[in-house]
């Protein structure tokens, strides 16, 4: 698998290298700045939405064409003006990025956020172009791109996260996007968790307490608290990214001990991975499985392989707030590790985007 992963990476770079500079694709995630503020997610029928429980969308723009991570073309439907990415071709596709990183349609930065209705309503908002006729109950928003350095040619996968692989040299690019997030913690400020608490349904009332030992298994879920500063570069209006760094076990610092990873069979055979979610409340050192707050936003599954760093999600920085993320297992994957920022860092981090 590691061999095929590096071949895949090579393939992406090789194909990118023959693309003319001005059409170099640029991949990113988006956040809405409103209100409502929130991450742009994509539901199962390709509707782009603000907030809610669907996985975060990852998009690529190339010469005014916007596509999602499945390669579906994003369009503004003529009859509804709704912003969707589907396999259909009936719609307008004239997207571009403003100098401030806003997504434009027909050169306009304003979009409408209208509450999603009907079955499956999860509190999210559907998104419409400025041309929407009836905007009753809707609110004007702008859509900020960010998440991956456009110069780094983020390689979108079918999951909500994108891996930056060790061997990809970043071709230079003239594509502009003013919001780009570091994909590791080596180049600047970062936040590490101040509280890490495993929970287990096998001991629903037991407090495991604060520990730097994270246990993510078919049984255990681990909670991570971050205290986001209120000052620059985390100030209100800034974007932040949640990263999961997963070095090779052989490159861990001795202080980090060894991690246990159940391996790639679960990942591939059972489509496994780690599911990260933002919780509605804040965990404390007394939190148990039974008292774990509910999920506010599920970022979906991140398939992890040693030797990679992952951008789990990009969102407006929760300036001055404490937030709790949970990490749980999908498809029988197990990872037990000691969170450590020493070289080589492992685990969950929050970084500010530029
Ligand atoms: C953009 O989409 C149009 C219409 O589908 C297509 O003709 C054109 O080749 C696409 N351009 C790029 C750079 O993909
Ligand atoms: C695309 O948008 C630009 C503004 O960015 C506008 O000038 C142009 O007319 C639009 N093209 C089409 C085909 O609508
Ligand atoms: C992951 O991040 C660490 C530290 O931030 C960095 O040293 C390492 O090179 C990164 N690995 C990859 C594969 O990008
Ligand atoms: C956990 O606490 C709840 C409520 O106090 C109780 O109903 C339940 O039996 C306890 N479970 C265990 C395994 O102790
Ligand atoms: C996690 O789950 C394993 C069983 O898979 C259990 O042995 C272990 O004690 C649990 N660890 C914590 C910290 O809950
Ligand atoms: C939305 O984001 C903007 C800018 O990022 C901020 O000024 C505003 O307070 C936010 N609103 C809410 C309701 O969080």
Image: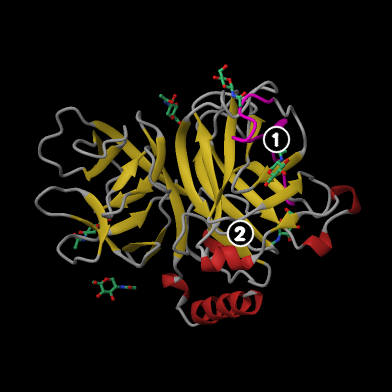
Q: Badge 2: how crowded within 10 Å, few (<14), some, or many (20+)?
A: many
Judging from the image, what secondary structure is the residue with disc 2 in?
loop
Real-space CA distance between mark 2 and mark 1, rounded to the nearest whole angstrom: 20 Å
Q: Residue at x 53, y 36 (%)?
A: 238
Which mark, residue 193?
1
Q: Mark 2 points at which residue?
A: 304
Q: Name the image colouring.
A: secondary structure
Please give left or right for residue 93 compared with residue 306 in the image: left
Residue 152 in percent (x, y) is at: 57, 64
**In terms of secondary structure, what is the magenta stretch mainly?**
loop
Which mark, residue 160?
none
- In the rendered structure, does residue 194 fall within the stretch colored magenta? yes
Judging from the image, what secondary structure is the residue with disc 1 in?
loop
Q: Which residue is drawn at 67% across and 72% down?
A: 167
Residue 121 in percent (x, y) is at: 26, 36
Q: Looking at the image, how many numbered discs can be counted on the residues? A: 2
Front-lying residue, 325 or 68: 325
Q: In which quarter of the image is ligand 4?
A: top right
Q: Do the residues labelled 2 and 1 touch (CB within 8 Å)?
A: no
Query: Where is 268 relative to 296, above or below?
Result: below
**Occupied quadrant, residue 74:** bottom left
Residue 117 in percent (x, y) is at: 20, 35
Please give left or right for residue 278 compared with residue 93 in the image: right
**Occupied quadrant, residue 88:** bottom left
Q: Can residue 353 be seen in this view?
A: no
Residue 276 in percent (x, y) is at: 54, 44
Q: Give the range drawn in magenta.
A: 186-206
Q: Is residue 98 visible?
A: yes
**Occupied quadrant, residue 209:** top right
């Amino acid at each position: 698998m590691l061999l095929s992963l590096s071949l895949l990476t090579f393939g992406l770079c090789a194909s990118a290298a023959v693309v003319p500079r001005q059409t170099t694709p640029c991949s990113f995630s988006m956040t809405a700045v409103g209100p409502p503020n929130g991450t742009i997610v994509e539901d199962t029928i390709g509707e782009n939405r603000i907030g809610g429980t669907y996985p975060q969308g990852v998009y690529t723009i190339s010469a005014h064409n916007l596509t999602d991570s499945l390669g579906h073309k994003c369009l503004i439907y003529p009859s509804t003006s709704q912003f969707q990415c589907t396999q259909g071709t009936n719609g307008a596709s004239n997207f571009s990025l403003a100098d401030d990183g806003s997504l434009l349609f027909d050169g306009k930065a304003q979009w409408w956020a209208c509450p999603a209705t009907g079955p499956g309503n999860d509190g999210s908002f559907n998104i419409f172009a400025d041309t929407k006729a009836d905007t009753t109950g809707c609110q004007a928003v702008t859509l900020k791109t960010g998440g991956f350095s456009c110069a780094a040619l983020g390689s979108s996968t079918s999951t909500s996260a994108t891996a930056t692989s060790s061997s990809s040299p970043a071709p230079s690019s003239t594509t502009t996007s003013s919001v780009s997030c570091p994909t590791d913690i080596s180049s600047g400020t970062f936040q590490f968790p101040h509280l890490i608490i495993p929970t287990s349904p096998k001991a629903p009332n037991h407090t495991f307490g604060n520990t730097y030992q994270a246990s993510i298994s078919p049984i255990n879920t681990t909670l991570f608290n971050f205290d986001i500063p209120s000052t620059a570069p985390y100030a209100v209006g800034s974007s932040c990214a949640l990263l999961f760094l997963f070095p090779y076990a052989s490159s861990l610092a001795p202080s980090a001990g060894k991690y246990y990873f159940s391996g790639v069979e679960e990942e591939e055979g059972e489509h496994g991975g780690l599911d990260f979610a933002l919780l509605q409340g804040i965990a404390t050192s007394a939190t148990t499985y039974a008292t774990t707050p509910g999920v506010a936003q599920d970022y979906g599954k991140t398939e992890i392989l040693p030797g990679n760093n992952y951008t789990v999600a990009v969102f407006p920085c929760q300036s001055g707030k404490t937030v709790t993320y949970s990490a749980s297992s999908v498809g029988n994957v197990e990872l037990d590790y000691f969170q450590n920022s020493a070289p080589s860092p492992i685990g969950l981090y929050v970084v500010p985007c530029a």
